[in-house]
Image: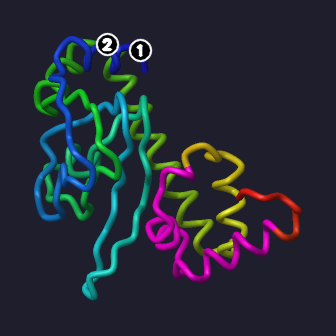
Amino acid sequence: MKSLYDCFLQLGISCQVEARQSLLRAGEVAQRLYLIEKGCARLCVIDSSGRETSTQFFFEGDVVGSLESLLTGNPSGQYLVTMEACHLRVIDAAQLMKQAQSDTNLHADLHALTQRRLIHYVNLYTSAIADSPTQRYLALQATHQQQLARIPLHILAAYLGVSAVHLSRIRRKLKSASGLDAI
């Protein structure tokens, strides 16, 4: 991913964005990629009832954007929203793609980024079918312990497919089962 990060440093524009700001709305065609230097953001969908469900969280060092929209030129089905105030590097996707045509390392990095996102979504889909909310929470805890504290409870609960009350019960049950004070 070195070539991609180098490209962000060379061509990207630095910007500050407040918490809860939309970087992309569903229905818009994505035209930018973002490198999170500080802060966190999420991709989410909003159903017909107005209920939000996050599909992925992004933290420092992550590159985020609606890749499917960037690659197809079709409108995104997701919103990209900051969860904290963010310091970002923003790059125009057309400029990045043009650069990737002549830079095989950058092209390989973009391909790897797309593969990672595909794998994430396959795992998310499989976990939603096969695992209980408690199992999904424990898996997140095992891989993203530090980041979990930065995700508001109601957003994390929707990601896991449960209510905030149910997630509180899961956390309380895990806490009492392990004898730990903080989960």
Question: Which part of the image, by quadrant, shows the C terminus?
Answer: bottom right
Instruction: Locate residue 181 relative to residue 43 in the image: left or right.
Output: right
Instruction: Classify mark 2: residues with Cα within 10 Å, few (<14), some (14-19) or many (20+).
Output: few
Q: Amino acid at mark 2?
A: Asp
Magenta residues, start to end: 148-175
Name the residue nearer the viewer: 178 or 3. Answer: 178
Label 1 element class: helix
Query: What residue sits right under mark 2 in the picture?
Result: 6
Query: Label 1 neighbourhood size at 10 Å, few (<14), some (14-19), many (20+)?
Result: few
Whether residue 158 appears in magenta in the rendering, the answer is yes
Amino acid identity at mark 1: Lys
Q: Residue shown at 12%/25% (left/top)?
A: 95
Q: Say which of 131 and 42 sits in front.
A: 42
Residue 91 location, x and y as percent?
17, 28
- Residue 128's quadrant in the figure? bottom right
Q: Main secondary structure of the magenta part?
A: helix
Q: Secondary structure at mark 2?
A: helix
Residue at 26%, 31% (x, y): give it.
88
User: Is 143 on the left-hand or right-hand side of 20?
Assistant: right
Label 1, on which residue? 2
